[in-house]
Each structure stands twice: as C-alpha cells, then as structure tokens.
C-alpha cells in the first residue's frame, strides 16, 4: 500500500478554517485519496475522496495538488464537533483501507 | 438505514472464555470488515469478507475466527484470548469492496477487555 504522511497534531480556533495536509509522494495513477475522521469514542467516518480534481461536499473540501503528491483537507469553519483524528488514505482497487497515524485536530473555543 | 450496528458495546472476558462479537448492516453492502484498534493507534485490518466469502485475512491468530452467515451479518468468534488482545474491535461495511471509490461505513465498535 502506498503510504501517506500527516502531521501528528494540529490546532485550530473555533469558527476558523482548518487546512489538514497530507503527503503521498508514491501515489499511483489509479489511487484515490480518501479522508476519514474518528471522533472520540466512535468508529471512523468517511469524509471525502477524490482523484485529481478538487472536491467539495457538505463536510469538507479536498484540494489535490496537480502532481497528486499531496492533498489538503479543508474544513471551512471548524467547530468543537470537528475535534477528531483525521486519516488520509490512498485506495486502489483492493478492498482494504490502510490507516496511517493520522492528524489529531484540537479545536480551541 | 445507513448504520452499522455492533453488539455488545463492551465485553469483559477471561482467557478461557468463548465469546462472539456481532455486526449487522442493512444497506445492501457486499463487503464487510473487522478491524482492531489499540488505544491511541490507528485501526488495523483483520479480515475482509466480500460477497460472503473471506477474501483477506491479515495473518490474524486462529483464536479469532470470523464468520459471515449472510450478507447482512458478520461475527467474530473469540476463544482463548490473551490480555494483549484487549482493544476496540470495529466492524465496517462497504458497497462493493474492490473499487477505488468504495467508502466504508463503520460501527461504533466493541470495547473488549481480556482478563
């Protein structure tokens, strides 16, 4: 599985935008970039995924670099409920997800 | 219904006990998964069932035995566990599995303590 690199932790003030980076220099041409998050005492939940173009949904935006070697998950307005561990995962055609260490996001009131 | 349910929420068992974890989904998903998560670590894949057949076993010890009775149910049978097996056991499902765009839906997990 191609690996991803994320900062261990980040902080954000409430109601401010948050940019969570992910490096994936060994990504293959067919790998999709998926983001999941895990809130305290819960199972992971899907956030967003993309291949080449930037993607938006109700939860977040995903900005993908032109060379696809990095991506950024954008939370437009962080709330206390967004405090979680965010995982950036590359997914090809296999049916397994390989979770890296993720980024622990702390939201400061 | 977009929920994956897991029972029990908590389980305490001795090393000689036999117990089972249960997982259920009614989204029509054809792939189901078991993950193990130790405290402050990411989830680690244990087993994958695709169309009710075991497709991935990540070298899990035989004291863990998965079972997929039908497309909606997934069990994990536990026998002769060790204290180091104490962890959060997560179940997930996805529409197909073998697709780059397939997304997984996770249950809340079963917190297992082995004494």
Image: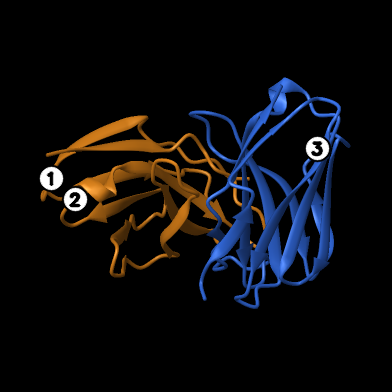
Chain colours: A orange, B blue
Mark 1 in CB contact with mark 3 (< 8 angstroms): no
Q: Residues within 10 Å of mark 3 (few under 14, many from 20)?
A: few
Give the residue number, with chain letter if any, for mark 2: A79
Q: Residues within 10 Å of mark 1 (few under 14, many from 20)?
A: some
Q: In the rendered image, which quarter is residue B30 located in? A: bottom right
Say which quadrant the N terminus of chain A sits in. Answer: top right
Give the residue number, with chain letter if any, for mark 1: A14
Residue visible at 57% across and 67% down in the picture:
B102
Q: Residues within 10 Å of mark 2 (few under 14, many from 20)?
A: some
> SS class of the residue under badge 2?
loop
Give the residue number, with chain letter if any, for mark 3: B60
Q: Is residue A76 above or below residue A84?
A: below
Q: Determine the chain carrying the residue at label 2.
A: A
Q: Determine the chain carrying the residue at label 3.
A: B
Q: Is residue B45 left or right of residue A50?
A: right
Q: Is residue A69 above or below residue A12?
A: below
In-front residue for pair A76/B12: B12
């Amino acid at each position: 599985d191609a690996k991803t690199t994320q900062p261990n932790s980040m902080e954000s003030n409430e109601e401010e935008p948050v940019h969570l980076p992910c490096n994936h220099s060994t990504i293959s041409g067919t790998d999709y970039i998926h983001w999941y998050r895990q809130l305290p005492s819960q199972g992971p939940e899907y956030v967003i995924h993309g291949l080449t173009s930037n993607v938006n949904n109700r939860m977040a935006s995903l900005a993908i670099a032109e060379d696809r070697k990095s991506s950024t998950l954008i939370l437009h307005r962080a709330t206390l409920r967004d405090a979680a561990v965010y995982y950036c995962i590359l997914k090809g055609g296999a049916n397994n997800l390989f979770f890296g260490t993720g980024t622990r996001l702390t939201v400061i009131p | 219904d977009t929920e994956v349910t897991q029972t029990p929420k908590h389980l305490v068992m001795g090393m000689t006990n036999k117990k089972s974890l249960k997982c259920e989904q009614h989204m029509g998903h054809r792939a189901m998964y078991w993950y193990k998560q130790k405290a402050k670590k990411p989830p680690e894949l244990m087993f994958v069932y695709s169309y009710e057949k075991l497709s991935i076993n990540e070298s899990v010890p035989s004291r863990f035995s998965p079972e997929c009775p039908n497309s909606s149910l997934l069990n994990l049978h536990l026998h002769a566990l060790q204290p180091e097996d104490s962890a959060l056991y997560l179940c997930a499902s996805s529409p197909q599995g073998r697709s780059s765009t397939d997304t997984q839906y996770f249950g809340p997990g079963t917190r297992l303590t082995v004494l």
